[in-house]
Amino acid sequence: MITTATILSGVAQGLIWAILTLGVYLTFRILDIADLTVEGTFPLGAAVTVVLINTGMSPAMAMFCALLAGAAAGFITGFLHTIFQIPAILSGILTMIALYSVNIRIMSDKATVALEQPSLKTWMLSLLPEGTVSNTVSIILGTVFCLLIVALLYYFFGTEIGCAVRATGSNQNMARSLGVKTDRVIILGLMISNALVALSGSLIAQLDYGSALVTMGQGTIVIGLASVIIGEVIFIRKDMNFALKLLAIIAGAVIYRTVIACALTFSFLKATDLKIITAVIVAFALALPVLQQKSAQRKLRRENAKKYDALIARELGGDTDA
Amino acid sequence: MLKMIQIEKSFNIGTINEKQIFNGLNLTIHDGDFITVIGGNGAGKSTMLNLIAGVHKADGGRIILDGEDLTYKNETQRAKYIGRVFQDPMMGTAPTMMIEENLAMAYRRTKRRTLAWGISQKERELYRESLAQLGLGLEDRMKTKVGLLSGGQRQAVTLLMATLQKPKLLLLDEHTAALDPATSAKVLQLSDRIIHEHGLTALMVTHNMQDAITYGNRLVMMNQGKIILDIKGEEKNKLTIEDLLHKFEDISGSKFASDSVLLGDR
C-alpha cells in the first residue's frame, strides 16, 4: 500500500540523494565525464563521518572532514586522468577500487560501523518539538543543504573560474587556446563533485542508515545518472537558467526516490530488485533520443508514402508502357 | 618580433613511424607582417603554426617572441600572446555557452582568472559594438548558444575572440577551408580588415594560391619542412599564380603535387 508515509520517506531520501545527484550532474553534464569515483566517495563520506563522530568529534566538523576526503578522492581521479592521461572512466574505477580498501581501513576492518555518539540528526531532533519523525528532519535538512549548494554552485559557475570549467567541458581545445589550464580545471571540477558526493554519503549515514556501510556505494553512479536524466527529461528546457536546472536535477532525485519507495511497497518487488529497475530506467532514458528519432522518421515515411504513392505508381506504370 | 631558429621536430620518435618534419627551420616574423603560407600536403605548414602556438613542442632550436623564450612554454602560457583561429569552425568556440560568454572567455585570455563575476555589464557594451562590426546581426543574439550558429558565423566569432585582446601574433590555420566559397571570401575579407585596423602581426596558412597572393605583405612557400620561397613588398604585389608554380618547380625540382593548391577551394 502506498501511504503518505511512503511518499514522505521517498521525498526525504530524495532530498539527501539529490546532493549526490548534483555532484554527478557536474561531472556528467558540465565536464562531460562519467565519473565512477562516486561509488567509492559515497561510502567514504559516510565512513569518515561516522568514525569521527564516534571518536567524539562534533557532527559539523566530521562532515567538513568528509567533504575534504571526498575532494581528495576527486583530486586523485583528476590527477590520473589529466596528468597521466588515463581515460576518465578508468581513472574513476581505479580510485573507486582503491577507496574500497581505504574505507575498510577507516572502519577498522568492519563492514558496518554504527553511530554511537550524537549526530546531526540528534541535534536537529533536540531543536524540533517532541514527536517529530525522522522524515521531517531529513526533509528540513535536505532542503537547507540543497538550497545552499544550489546557491553556491550558481555563484561559482558564474565566476571567471566557473566559466573556465564550463568552457573546458564544452570545448577543451578552445579553453586551452584561451589560456585556461584545462588539467587544473578538470581536477577542480572532480574535487567539487566528489566533495558533494561525500557530503551526501555523510548525511545518508547520519539521517537515514544510522551507520556507515562498506557496500553503500554500489550502484550510486547509476542512481545519480537516473536522477539527472529524470530531472532533465521532465523539467529541463533549452536556455533554462542554471539555478533552475540545478533545482530540476534535485526534483529528479526526489521523484526517483519517491517512485522507488512506492514501487517497493508492491509485494512482488524485493528491495534487491532496485538495481535492475534503476539500470532499466537509465538504459531506457539514454535510448530515448534514438527511439524518438527513429519513430519520427518512420512517421515521416508513412506520410510521404500516403502523399506520393499514387504518383509513384503512375510513374512506374508509365515506364512499363514505354 | 617572433624568431624561429634552427627548429627541429619529429613525430613518433623511437617508433617505426618516426617522421622528421623540420630539420633546421628558420623564420623571422617582423611586427606588422601579414604572412601568407602555402605549400603542399605534408610541407609542415600546420606543424609550424602548432609549434608557435605550443600545441607541439620543438625537439631542438629556439622560438623567441619579443625577447622571451617560448620554446618550452606550454600552450596555455603562450595563449597570453597568441590568438588563434582553426580550420574546423567547431574548434574555436564553446557550443554550449552563449556568444557573450564565449567572448568573455576570450576577453580574459591574457588575465589570471579569479572568483570575480565572469562577465560585466560594461563588457557587454564592448561585445555588442565588436559584434556589430562583423555585420552579421549577432549583436542582437548575444544570449544565443554558439552551437546554434552556422560555420561561417562561428568562424567570425572565433576571429573576433582571437583579436578581442590584441595578440602579439595572430595564427590563422586554413581558417576558411571548411566554409562555402561565398562565406569563405567574407571571412577572409573580415580577417584582412581586422588585421589592418588593429595593426596585427599575422600568419595565415592557406591552400588557395590566389588568396595567398591577394592578402598580406609577405608570402612564404614551404616544401618538405623547408621554406623554399619568401617574397615581400613590391615583388609580392606583382606575383601571379603562374609565377608561383614556375618558382616552385625551379626550386623544388618537381611539379606542384596538389591540385587543390592550384585550383584553390572554390
Image (cartoon, rainbow, N blue to C red):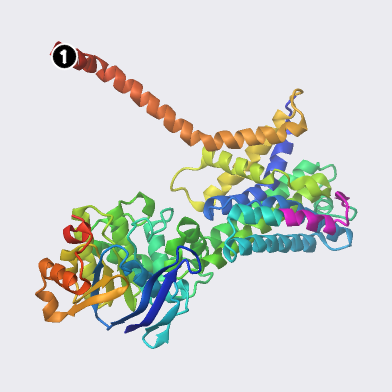
Q: Which of B53 and A45 is in front in this view?
A: B53
Picture coordinates of residue B211, whole percent (x, y): 18, 65
Q: Nearer the viewer, residue A262 or A131?
A: A262
Picture coordinates of residue A115, whole percent (x, y): 87, 52
Picture coordinates of residue B94, whole percent (x, y): 42, 57
Q: Tell me if B124 is positioned left or right of A280 in this view.
A: left
Disc 1 chain ID: A
Q: What stretch is highlighted in magenta?
A: A97-115
Q: Nearer the viewer, residue A57 or B5?
A: B5
Q: Nearer the viewer, residue B10 or A51?
A: B10
Look at the image and tell me in which quarter the C terminus of chain A lies. top left
Q: How many labels does the image show?
A: 1
Q: Is residue B214 visible?
A: no
Residue, x 70% and y 59% (percent of image)?
Answer: A70
Local secondary structure at mark 1: helix
Residue at the far bottom in the pictured view: B67
Residue labelled with disc 1: A318
Residue at the far left in the pictured view: B238
Q: In this view, does A301 lie above or below A218?
A: above
Q: Tell me if A23 is positioned left or right of B206 in this view.
A: right
Q: Give the quarter of the image for residue A188.
A: bottom right
Q: What residue type is labelled 1?
A: Gly
| Magenta stretch: includes residue A178 | no
